[in-house]
Amino acid sequence: MRECFELQDTDAGGRLGELTVPRAGVTVETPALLPVINPNLDTISPRRLADEFGAEILITNSYIIYNTDDVRERALSEGLHDMFDFPGAIMTDSGSFQLSEYGEITVTTEEILQFQADIGSDIGTPVDIPTPPDVSRERAAEELETTKDRLEIADGVDVGDMLINAPVQGSTHPDLREAAARHADSTGLDVFPVGAVVPLMNDYRYDDMIDVVAAAKRGLGADAPVHLFGAGHPMMFALAVAMGCDLFDSAAYALYARDDRYLTVRGTQHLEDIEYFPCSCPVCSTHEPADVRALPDQQREETLAAHNLHVTFGEIRRIKQAIRAGNLLELVEQRARAHPTMLDGYRTLLDHADQLEASDPVSKGAFFYTSHESARRPEVLRHRRRLERLSVPDSLFLTEGDGDGPAEYDDSWRVKPPFGPFPRALSKSYPLTAEVPTRVDRGALEAAAAGITRLVESNPDSEFGVGHLDWPAGALEALPDSVETIDLTESHRS
Amino acid sequence: MRECFELQDTDAGGRLGELTVPRAGVTVETPALLPVINPNLDTISPRRLADEFGAEILITNSYIIYNTDDVRERALSEGLHDMFDFPGAIMTDSGSFQLSEYGEITVTTEEILQFQADIGSDIGTPVDIPTPPDVSRERAAEELETTKDRLEIADGVDVGDMLINAPVQGSTHPDLREAAARHADSTGLDVFPVGAVVPLMNDYRYDDMIDVVAAAKRGLGADAPVHLFGAGHPMMFALAVAMGCDLFDSAAYALYARDDRYLTVRGTQHLEDIEYFPCSCPVCSTHEPADVRALPDQQREETLAAHNLHVTFGEIRRIKQAIRAGNLLELVEQRARAHPTMLDGYRTLLDHADQLEASDPVSKGAFFYTSHESARRPEVLRHRRRLERLSVPDSLFLTEGDGDGPAEYDDSWRVKPPFGPFPRALSKSYPLTAEVPTRVDRGALEAAAAGITRLVESNPDSEFGVGHLDWPAGALEALPDSVETIDLTESHRS
Ligand SMILES: [Mg+2]
Ligand SMILES: [Mg+2]
Ligand SMILES: [Zn+2]
Ligand SMILES: [Zn+2]
């Protein structure tokens, strides 16, 4: 068991956890948001991030510090904690991105980690190769070998109790991401950033982002804290958490503020387009948009950054509460409607329902069916699998109605879309207590039909009948031919 | 044109408007939330409601005032505005609900309106009969006659420049609601509460609520301000606004706070179940749940009431901004995932797409396809209708591909789910600029098929071909038999 990370609760692939950062002497609750601090610019001071917004951890770039003489000297003499006046944990990035964009690496992995340790970083990062999406398998595999070498070197460096990031690369090749994750997990390193996803975010490729994270998660143990590196828009936090991400970093709060952009969980808006602040944060409940527009540049930037942070940290709390209450996927259902590409992301998340099912609790508060997509949730899949293991009599009537059905059947079970059939004794157990809409959709009916099919195929020697309420042809056609079907609509109404 | 209400903008059935309240000398922006003030209890003072939360109008109960000796005397001598120290508009309810529950009416319509005028109400209410849902048509019709009589009496009363509410009753009988609305609209009365919907809200019958509002709206002119009377949960504001409601009143913010209940746009939570405040309001960004739980009763109630108000007014601002930006239905898409009954409500709203289409702007910012339900939006319906009016050549190829299709066709049009076909010249015009997910669903495909069918049936003398990308059998079967179909998947990929 990795000592620095302890899971407190799970929901789908999402986790509430505690990341212990020994060098800082603090424990960070996850999911956590790491505000990015640019050592040369200071929109909102780190002290204010801690005191006013509750930031427990932040991230800054060791490459920028290394390359700015006066900052480097201050960092080396005072240490990052005093220099920033920040009481929580501080993670440093190695600047892999800058190095890969702008220059050659002139320092060794040992040197760069030692420098991070020297300036007082609590979690350091080796220089990996951030292979972008969509490159050839050859290039991704080759660059991954370099990243692996660096991780192995990092694993051998003695930097005291500083934790070390083990970035997971592999571009958009799922097998490479999975192998990279398995390798990273096998080292003694501590935190696992899923790297080079920023280009996917920039192009709204939330479906591909989910596939990348899913692949990385398959290679990592449940005790591995996962950082979605460079992803800071609150719109997609819930989705990424549901796939198993624990840490996010946001430069967006400050960068967007500089451009008069206003973050919301429904997307980004420009200040000039806002007539009413769609938010109840301390900024938006005390300012009018026109007043903020009239502020001098620096004050306007700071005001917008404060709103952006309130929204961002509010969403992190909302996600934590959702995991605790067991309704994270209900939150994702809503966030998936923020943009068509978020819907693609959610549909892709559900492609991995099988993987999510492994960590999803057997019982939660309530399952809410709130879209066609709900029919593909891991709980539905789990129930369908469970059907294979239930014993059935020689003949069984499966019915949406309240009655027992025709007398020739030995017994009757209930059918509830999207789950399908189950013995009545299970009616009160999760997820069969689900709240479902009155207006049943085809997604739910076809999932129920798949459940019936699973039960019938698992019990080839039993006879089955199905009593349904006005199912359309498509759902009925999905049932095995051997099943007798009866439309109960008339008798049910009377 | 009704002088007191002016529309500024519309989106689906939702409206931004200005309600001029002459007696208060103020203009109230709608959609508006009227906090309910109990003259005997004071969780948050009216002055604080105005200054801290931006309340422009509140509502109080004239029956309680009338029946509480000292309050009545103060109200008569000082007037409500001074008594409450409230600078905005004040609406008074007549106490129809209390009267119908607890007693006989001992005063006339004239007297009760005169009393409201005497205490300084800006918008008064006659005593109507709040017929509950699900009663027989006979009872609903009979009680409606009494309500109509009262409205006609109210119309003749001289109460200076006090506006008067004209409640619309009719239980769950759409034809009676519509007739009631038409009658109310024909009087000289000013504001139109849709009455007796609280039992529907209490039972989460958002589908029936929408049907009731839709019926009332059919009987009312566009210049009629509509009040969804007794509906104060922010979860359903966007849905109700999209159907055409302009005013809401909230007793919930205070009543719920008294029971340690915490409002969110995703539903209600109990304080004891909250480990992380899922909110960024001034209360939640400065308090921990455990600290609020530890507060003395009165302070805890006030703290929760403040949160409840922040969420409620924040949602009103979000809705106003959505109407301005033209993405109200995108907001409803998200709110519809708060609870399965809200999904029922949204699906019912889309049953009235035809009615919504009448007020929906021809052009808006962007159409986001974010669920199967999006395929039933009024914009899709409008495009389908427009197809009847477009002229087509003798033979026309309708294609999801980029090319022109087979040479034997005179021309080719584009096909874009969920809209269906259109001449390429329209590609850049709303709603055909829609953002759609990469993963097209059956809702979108079948809507596109319906569009094609409409075009084909409107042009029986033309020949049509359809080039599609891997449509499933269900969508293809929805096309007319006369249409030649070609799957372009292979050629498209190459
Ligand atoms: Mg849990
Ligand atoms: Mg507009
Ligand atoms: Zn804000
Ligand atoms: Zn709050």
Image: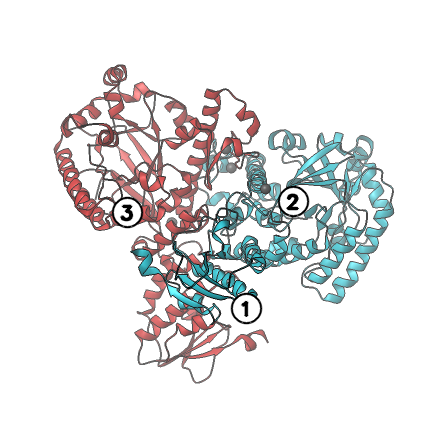
Chain colours: A red, B cyan
- Helix, strand or loop at label 2? It is strand
Q: Earlier in the sequence, mark 2 or mark 1?
A: 2
From the viewer's perspective, is the residue at label 3 or at label 1 nearer? 1
From the viewer's perspective, is the residue at label 2 or at label 3 nearer? 3
Q: Tell me where residue B188 appears, x and y as whole percent.
A: 81, 47
Mark 2 crowd level (few <14, some 14–19, many ≥20, 10 Å Cα):
many
Vertical side of B127 occupied by A43: above or below: above
Q: Label 3 is placed on what type of residue? A: Val
Q: Check if mark 2 and mark 1 are on a common chain.
A: yes
For residue B248, the mark is: 2
Give the alpha-carbon distance from disc 2 to disc 1, as whole Å. 50 Å
Q: How many marks?
A: 3
Question: Looking at this view, is B413 or B242 the one in front?
Answer: B413
Q: Which residue is disc 3 drawn over? A: A212
Mark 3 crowd level (few <14, some 14–19, many ≥20, 10 Å Cα):
many
Residue found at x 73% / y 66% = B137
Q: Is residue B245 left or right of residue A287?
A: right
Q: Label 1 is placed on what type of residue? A: Pro
Q: Which residue is disc 1 drawn over? A: B460
Q: Check if mark 2 and mark 3 are on a common chain.
A: no
Give the alpha-carbon distance from disc 3 to disc 1, as whole Å. 50 Å
Q: Quadrant of the N terminus of chain A?
A: top left
